[in-house]
Amino acid sequence: MGDKVLRLKKEDTVLVGIDFQERLMPAMKNNVELEAAAVKLVKGCRILGVPVIMTQQYTKGLGPTVTALAEALTEPIGEGVGSAEFQHVEKTSFSAMGEPVFVEEMEKIGRKTVIIAGIEAHVCVQQTVVDLLEKGYTVFVANDCISSRSNTDKKYSQRRMGDSGAVGTTYESILFELCGGAGNPGFKQISALVK
């Protein structure tokens, strides 16, 4: 990393949500707080015009994305952000980067900074983060929007991702950095969202 200061700019950022699925979520540590934080991150990114890609690991076995997040991705959100259709990228590879459809989506969006949220921290999230870094992406991990079944797994995956060059942060920090200032569009909505 050297002396390069890594910053979030909404014009060059994409949010990737990893496998927030119905059969996985109940087993996650602090899953209630996790879901609430992830919902706010998704809504905030939509308010600020940051595209969101959601993955699902083997949907047939692990179920669809949890309702609260599917709704956060599709409901109309105030000033000019209408409703959207829920879409996800299906995967069987633990790393989203092992899924050609995901790689194509990322190339189509063409942004080089990735915010990562999802489960499980030490498997699909970590492998996706390491692969994104290897491909030259700048990665910010929303630490309050990732989890594992065990805190030990989460802790060591956060360390591993950090050692690999990812920036660990929180959803609120991310949203305010993307917003940039109190006079900027979206600030009032973001403030209301995080309260």
Image (cartoon, helix red, strand yellow):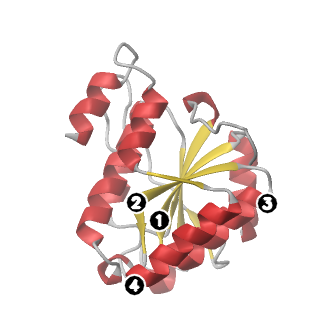
Q: Residue furthest top?
A: 183
Which comes before the other along the chain, label 4 or label 1? 1
Of 179 and 44, the residue lying toward us: 179
Q: Which residue in the protein does label 3 denote?
A: 134
Quarter assignment of residue 30: bottom left
Q: Which residue is mark 1?
A: 118
Task: Measure how far apart labels 4 and 3 are at the Cα level.
Answer: 27 Å
Are the residues tagged 1 and 3 within 8 Å (C-beta)?
no
Q: Which mark is residue 105?
A: none
For the residues bearing labels 1 and 2, Cβ distance under 8 angstroms = yes
In terms of sequence position, does the residue under pointer 3 or pointer 2 come before the other? 3
- Residue 145 - label: 2
Q: Are marks 4 and 1 in contact (CB under 8 Å)?
A: no
For marks 4 and 3 on the same chain, the one whose residue lies earlier in the sequence: 3
Q: Is residue 107 visible from the viewing direction of this image?
A: yes
Q: Which label sits in the foreground, 1 or 3?
A: 3
**Residue at the extreme front of the image, as rendered:** 3
